[in-house]
Amino acid sequence: MAHSNDGRKRPTARRRPGARRRLRCEVPSTVAVLADERDFAAMRRYASFTFDDHATYLRQMEGLLRTLAAEGTYTSVALFDPVDYEEFCSDSHLDPDTAASRTRYTAEVAAAGSKVTYEGQPIGRLLPQLVDEAEQQATWEYATALLARGGDCATCGEDTGKTAFAKASQLLRRLVEAVGPGTHHLVCSVPAEGDVPLVAVLHTESHADGMLRLGEAAALIFCTVLAAGIATDRPGGVVLRTTTPGAPDTVRGWGLRDGRLRPLSEAEVFDAYCTDADTGEPVPPEPGVEYRAGLPLDAPGGSAEPQEPETPETPEKGA
């Protein structure tokens, strides 16, 4: 240990590596993972990608994540998309068959997309979280594009997208207020181009004192999808499942039509929830779940919306 002119001890070179290790813990890390077999197979064409088996690759990836966590490194996990990677290398004039190119893609592209924070969860639980996050991000981007197409209202001159989003936010608040306290799981489904609908999922907790807890990002996606249905006048639906202590779960539904959420009858809720969204075949009802008619959603000023039943597009099952 060396001494300074004032007599105080000064760190020597022997202690500096420890300081660098502490500093390294303050540098965040992003790891991009090949989540499924097809993406993994696409990367095997590169000689510099030396993994032969997807299961082994995932085990090694999980080991890497654990090591980073043990070192105190804040780590987020993103998806590695082989198609995007190839385009990135072509646009950036990079050789795709190098580890350096994969590193640049992770830092510049994957890290800018959907990510999940690694908190020690097993890889088998982490990957579905990551895929779901990516799907929700894609849903938000698509719904946002639909809203942007609307332009200004020919009658009032207002931005139709902003107007629809404000209305969707009000409808979400009324939905949660109407069903009261409990843990609520909401699914909004709106038709899109092609066979796959836009689906947004939101979890909320409502307390008797009026306090509402929800994830801001999920609420943004939910309102954007609902707003897209309103702005484009597409029929859709909302299913809401409520869990309260000591009582059966209840499922209610509303149909989106003419910019309004109209309550479905008990039979319509049952049909919507107990029908396979892909095949149209009936699905057995869950034991201990009650299917109830949707509640009327009071419009501003206290007037209730019309109550005539509407049969919407079948909301995605899973509320």
Image: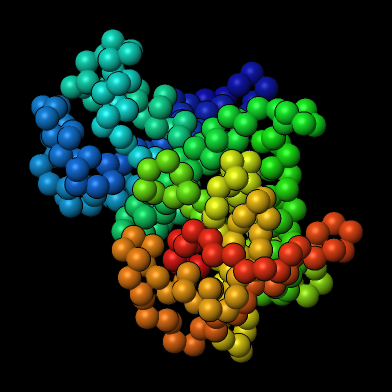
- Residue furthest right as drawn: 301
Residue under the point 77% across and 28% down = 157
> In the image, is residue 131 above or below residue 28?
below
Residue under the point 35% across and 40% down = 79
Instruction: Tell me the quarter of the picture where residue 104 sits.
Output: top left
Which is more toward the observer, 104 or 192?
192
Q: How is the image coloured?
A: rainbow
- The percent coordinates of residue 233 (x first, y second) are 60, 45
> In the image, is residue 100 above or below residue 300?
above
Q: Is residue 312 visible?
A: yes
Which is more toward the observer, 309 or 143?
309
- Residue furthest top as drawn: 93
Q: Is residue 186 visible?
A: no
Instruction: Tell me the quarter of the picture where residue 86 sits.
Output: top left
- The percent coordinates of residue 114 (x first, y second) are 46, 40
- The percent coordinates of residue 112 (x first, y second) are 47, 31
Instruction: Tell me the quarter of the picture where residue 126 sits.
Output: bottom left
> In the image, is residue 4 above or below residue 237?
above
Residue under the point 39% across and 32% down = 110
Which is more toward the observer, 50 or 200?
200
In the rendered picture of this protein, how many numbered marks are placed on residues? Answer: 0
- The percent coordinates of residue 240 (x first, y second) are 58, 68
Residue under the point 60% across and 75% down = 265
